[in-house]
Amino acid sequence: MKQFAFVVVGMALSVPSVAAARDYCPTRPSLGQSACTVEAGHFAIETALTDWERSRDSDTVLFGDTLFRLGLSDATELQVEWTPIGVARDRPIGRNVARTGDLEVGTRIALRNPDGKGLSYGLQPSVLVPVGRSPIGDGGWGAAMVAPVSYDLSDRLNLQFSPEIAWLPREQGRGNMVVATATVGLGLTLSKACQLTTELQFERADDVTDHRLALAVAWQLSDDVFIDTGGAAGLDDHTPELRLYSGISKRF
């Protein structure tokens, strides 16, 4: 699996870029979303190099979780996300289960400032296609709508808010449930090539509310390439205790 990660990095760094008119704004490594889109004539591939999450009785590792973004117009992009393989370990019984994740297909529509500057907001509808299997996939059809908003407080500070409502499958095939999520973030530009983002996320499903606190750093290696690393900690008994992740994003 480590060899796969190195191959992804090598491919992303070796493919030549086409000049773009505006700055590239990766979705990674934030927990929330933004209204910033990839302009028409360009696409982006954003891939997780590592992604490990620890719960009270289990560990989950995802390999190659990838988001593909294709600019359809100045303010609209197509998004396709898929996890080719994930491994869930049940620690009490020492059992590992490897499965493929589901496919998420959607679009991002910027209603104001598709470059993410100033006040930027939009809509992001998506559909979950059950091509994977539990415990990595959800095992059923689903749908979601995000309404991301961001605002530049100054040249160095950016306030972010991502409310989301989703209709997702329950575990063990017990139908679907409504999941409401709100992610509030603050981005701090440390230098021209480095940005720090801290986020607080609330998620409610079936009368249970999860709380997460996340911190991530992204480095810009060139106009079209970013690498990132981050982590999220659960703030209550219902939320996975810890998640650590890293990845690479490239615009073509």
Image (cartoon, rainbow, N blue to C red):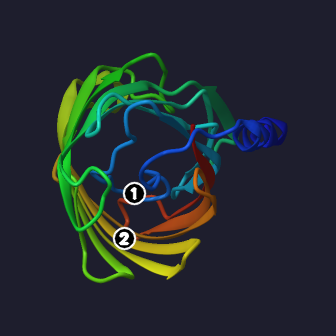
Quadrant of image for the C terminus? top right
Q: Answer with mark 2 or mark 1, whichever residue precedes in sequence.
A: 1
Give the secondary structure at mark 1.
loop
Q: Amino acid at mark 2?
A: Glu
In-front residue for pair 59/250? 250
**Residue 178 placed where, x, y %?**
16, 39
How much space separates mark 2 and mark 1, taking CA atoms? 7 Å
Q: Amino acid at mark 1?
A: Leu
Quickly name the residue at label 1. 31
- Residue at figure coordinates x 43%, y 48% from the top left: 21
- Residue at figure coordinates x 84%, y 38% from the top left: 3
**Residue 198 placed where, x, y %?**
41, 74
In-front residue for pair 81/206? 81
- Residue at figure coordinates x 55%, y 76% from the top left: 192
- Residue at figure coordinates x 21%, y 59% from the top left: 120
Can residue 167 be seen?
no
Q: Residue furthest right?
A: 3
Mark 2–mark 1 contact, CB under 8 Å? Answer: yes
In-front residue for pair 153/146? 153
